[in-house]
Image (tube, helix red, strand yellow):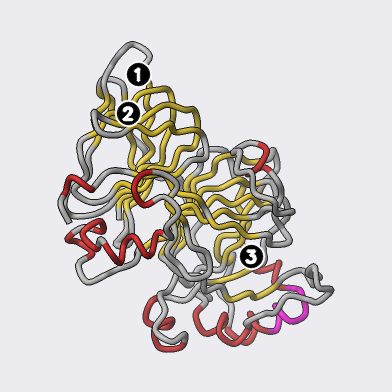
Amino acid sequence: MSSRLNKPFLLKPAAKDYLWGGNRLNTEYAKKIELTPLAETWECSTHSDGLSVVASGRFTGLPLNEVLKANPDFLGTRNNGLNELPILVKFIDANKDLSIQVHPDDAYAFKNENGQKGKTEMWYVLDAAKDAKLVYGLREDVTTDELKKSALDGSIKKYLQTIPVNKDDVFYIESGTIHAIGAGCLIAEIQESSNLTYRLYDYNRIDKNGKKRGLHLDKAVDVANTSASKEPRQPIRVLKYENGVARELLSRCKYFEVYRMIVNTERRQIVHYQSDELGFRVLLCINGCGTIGNEDFSLDVFKGDCVFVPANSEMFRIHGKMQFLDIRG
């Protein structure tokens, strides 16, 4: 396909009504999704469990996976051979505690889950209640037998490392790390394109069908890191300023690279943006509003919107007062 087609476009998310969700994604991020609760929106996804749909431009109305299959160059040379996204981008509204859970790595998932990917993820905290917490690993070494027994009898909480959460925090959750998002957290999640979650403990909660949600104890114990985890420290973050924009690196791993980008062109400064031929980018607007475009196209972007930027995109300008997560795949 000619690079003249490589224009950014808006995405419409898939949505999930998990029992722990709230409604902030509707009230504060204007999702206009008729689900109660609204727990997650999968903003940029080609996963079969929740496909994003193109919401602007020539591909409007098409599922993102179909667009990428027809235009594999949109993924970039780094992703040669793929016809779907290697990552998944979400908003998560935790009105209640999520289950105590763990994700497999790629090797385990490939072998035991019909060739699927594992799940390493990153959380950027958009907002957090005053006493919000999350679970990150274990406070002490345990045996697999102790872990399984404690999950069954509900005493697992004594082993869990609980961490206070504040707005603007960043957490990197490697596969195998036992974890849980706590009530009162509003989070942007960037992860491998996977929906594999092994629940260890779910507080004996009842779902909308009157049944307890299933646990996955054997697989969870197989993949869990049972050694004590170091308390996560916030990464050193350095804002780099140019005319109209400031950037800071939040997280970098072999699966994704994530920056926070603060745009303010109120003084008529110009912010230019372009992806290279190596990979696609995703711009997730986490605050403010503005426009992106050039002589050929223009998109109005608001808090909560998600923009897919194909590899080797046209140069475009960003104008307004807003913040993005600039996600590079």
Q: Nearer the observer, disc 3 or disc 1? A: 1
Front residue of this view, candidates 127 and 40: 40
Question: What residue is disc 2 on?
Answer: 318
The region drawn magenta spans 149-155
Expressed as whole percent of the image width and height from the top left, the position of residue 57 reads 36, 44
Foreground mark, 3 or 2, reads: 2
Residue matched to label 1: 265
Q: Who comes first in sequence, dot 3 or dot 2?
A: 3
Q: Residues within 10 Å of mark 3 (few under 14, many from 20)?
A: many
| Helix, strand or loop status at disc 2 | strand
Up the image or down, 251 lies above or below 226; here it is above
Placement of 287 over or under 182, stated as above or below: above
Apparent side of residue 198 relative to residue 277 in the rendered image (left or right): right
The amino acid at mark 1 is Thr
Structural distance between the alpha carbons of marks 3 and 1: 45 Å
Badge 1 density bin: few <14, some 14–19, many ≥20, Cα 10 Å = some
Magenta span: predominant SS is: helix
Q: Quadrant of the C terminus?
A: bottom left
Which of disc 1 and disc 2 is earlier in sequence?
1
Q: Residue at x 72, y 70 (%)?
A: 202
**Looking at the image, can residue 190 be seen?**
no
> Distance from label 2 to label 1 (Cα)?
8 Å
Most distant residue in the right direction: 210
Res. 160 mark: 3
> What kind of residue is marked 2?
Ile
User: Residue 264's quadrant in the figure?
Assistant: top left
Q: Residue at x 42, y 64 (%)?
A: 46
